[in-house]
Image (spheres, rainbow, N blue to C red):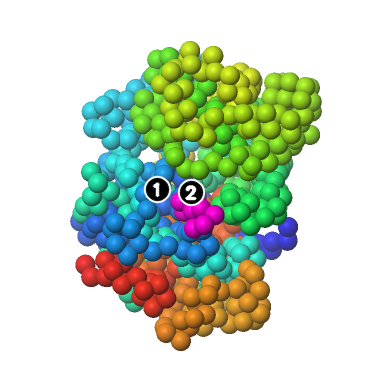
Amino acid sequence: MKTLTIALILVISPLSPCADEGMWTFDNPPLKQWKERYGFEPPPGWLDHVRLASVRLNGGGSGSFVSPDGLVMTNQHVGRSQVQKLSTPQRDLIKHGFYAASREDELPCPDLEVNVLVSYEDVSQRVHGAVQPGASDKDANAQRKAEMAAIEKESAEKTGLRSEVVTLYSGGEYWLYRFKKYTDVRLVFVPEEQIAYFGGDYDNFTYPRYCLDITFFRVYEGGRAARTDHYFKWSQNGPSEGELVVISGYPGSTNRLMTLAQLKYHRDVGNPLQMQVWTSRHDALVRFAALGTEQARRASAARLSLSNSIKRLVGQQAGLMNPRILGKKEEEEKALRSEVERRPELKRDFGSAWDQIAAAYATLPDKAPRIAFSDLAPSRLGSIALNLVRYVEEIRKPNERRYEEFRDSKLDSFKFGLLSPAPIYKDLEEAVLTAWLEQGSKILGLQDPFVRAALEGKSPAETAKWAVGGTKLTDVAARKALLEGGAEAVARSDDPMIVLARRVDPIMRELRAWREENIQSIEIGAGEKLAKARFAVYGKTIYSDATSSLRLGYGTVSSYEEGTTLVPFRTTFYGLYDRAASFGEKAPFNLPQRYKDKQADFDLATPLNFVYTADTIGGNSGSPVINRAAEIVGINFDSNLQKLPNRYLYIEESEGSRAIAIHSAAIIEVLKKIYGAAKLVSELTEQ
């Protein structure tokens, strides 16, 4: 793993977010900043239009409607898993790409769900009010969860919409989000992965960049393309340098409101442990891929996803290891604690929160390895088996007492994923499960309860061969029979993967209960206190950490200095061909054949990628980048190295922190000149 050199900056007080900082919820948009810094006041209905044109994909990532006929644009790497599930050894869509010239040619995705946030409602008072006076942390956590479950169920039954209670400000606020969901989603266009991921891992999180990381899907209702009144129109010219742009998407997770105790846990325990988990899984996939072309195809989506996660984690950890970050975090925490101590009413109500979190996190390092490795999640078959075992147990409980993922409001989506017809490859499953059990045995030891239950005296290889080789869970009908047969069918099943899941589930439940009681319940209770303290001191000038909920970001299209050189705000196709030629067309800098054949057919001066200063993180992949007129000027797909520590703090644009997007003009140029996708171009531009 190569060393990352990251420029770090001083953190400004939460009283005044820096420059283009913030992942803002739609109930608290940065209107003041837009007006003061850019003279932009969105017209009535603008925010609603942006929200309704933005989508979430259930596999992770963001997207947007770009035509009135349900056309959705996202990144190739966001849609990669679906494209791989649609591929076969004879028809590798990842390698060769795909374009449906007609609606009849569009390919139904096996398990892709697209969500649109249609309404939201503040339910903080109801959730906070559900906690009984004098309740213990454990009871208070259960009472909050029960109320959230009740709110979601009431909403789903009343509206028919997917309903989720979203936690903001670490428990300071709770909002009910209602989503319209589409489950009939079809693939329209995807380029070759070689052009979507040009430069491979070498160029990942770097800039200048030369990628066409795009995919188009279409959502259907009742067998017809869905009519979508809210969609983004297309800017064929794209952005100019210095122009204000806005991004709308679903950033996954930031930890900027964490206490010092939490950050030090991430630095010393959490991130190194996560690296062990991801590296083990990644290495297993690399070994499997080396066995042959077909094995490489089967492993590619998961392998590339893990490669991306590992490189991002290296940058995040490098940020935490830099003493300047912890120093500024200490200043932030000291300033807020001093103000709380100064005010008797704040000290009485909130002063204990930091120490409560610190005491809880002091207990976590001993349990963390067990929590991390006591799972079957790396195996898709293992996950299916665990879900079946847990479902039949949880569904017998009252809705408010179930695990969150088995609440009534989530069951339709749960069953949609569980019964996916996507192919499952037993050779890949056996290799992955063997490696995972080997690593778990090594880290936890053979006497660990999970390891003993999983192996029962056999080797990891023997266990994986038995469980994968004899299971029938690759058959959707077998899964459906167990799902409908309920607890009795699952209890008497002799399917070896179900047997394995039954053996390990009690240990996993025990660890989950421990974490909920000793970490989560304290973290949420104390987090609520800290949020209220921040509101009392700073007001609502701060934004909530990212939580995979819909957010707004903004910034300018801007070049930057790096070392002694100036980095351009945009790249062109000239640069793409030059980079390929400079490496002698050797992978990962080789071009797809059609790009060689048609080099003379299109304008090489067309902008390809550009950088901008908006505050983004993982999950923003696929987010639309729009101008003041709410037109598409680009699509977000990555960031540079300087930006990676922004999980824990905002890295200012003056330090070269940039998000990276594909230019809208590039998309039209290649669709028209390289892929001959005239109908798709017309749908995007003739509105």
Q: Nearer the viewer, residue 122 or 453?
A: 453
Name the residue rendered at 32%, 45% in the picture. 184
Q: Is residue 524 above or below residue 259?
A: above
- Crowd rating for badge 2 (residues with CA inside 10 Å; few <14, some 14–19, many 20+): many
Magenta includes 87?
yes
Instruction: Indicate the quadrant where residue 672 lies.
Output: bottom left
Depth order, front residue of 110/535 = 110
Q: Secondary structure at mark 2?
A: helix
Determine the residue positioned at 52% across, 57% down.
90
The first of marks 1 and 2 along the sequence is: 2
Image location of residue 633, percent across then percent down:
36, 69
Q: Residue at x 25, y 32 (%)?
A: 160
Residue 125: quarter of image: top left
Q: Which mark is residue 85?
A: 2
Mark 1 touching mark 2, by CB under 8 A? yes
Query: Which quadrant, please, contains the C terminus?
Result: bottom left
Dot 1 amino acid type: Cys
Q: Which mark is residue 109?
A: 1
User: Residue 40 at x, y = what percent?
Assistant: 30, 65
Q: Quadrant of the N terminus?
A: bottom right
> In the structure shown, which secondary structural element does the residue marked by tag 1 occupy?
loop
Is 627 displayed left or right of 481 in the figure?
Answer: left
Please provide the residue range marked out in magenta.
83-91
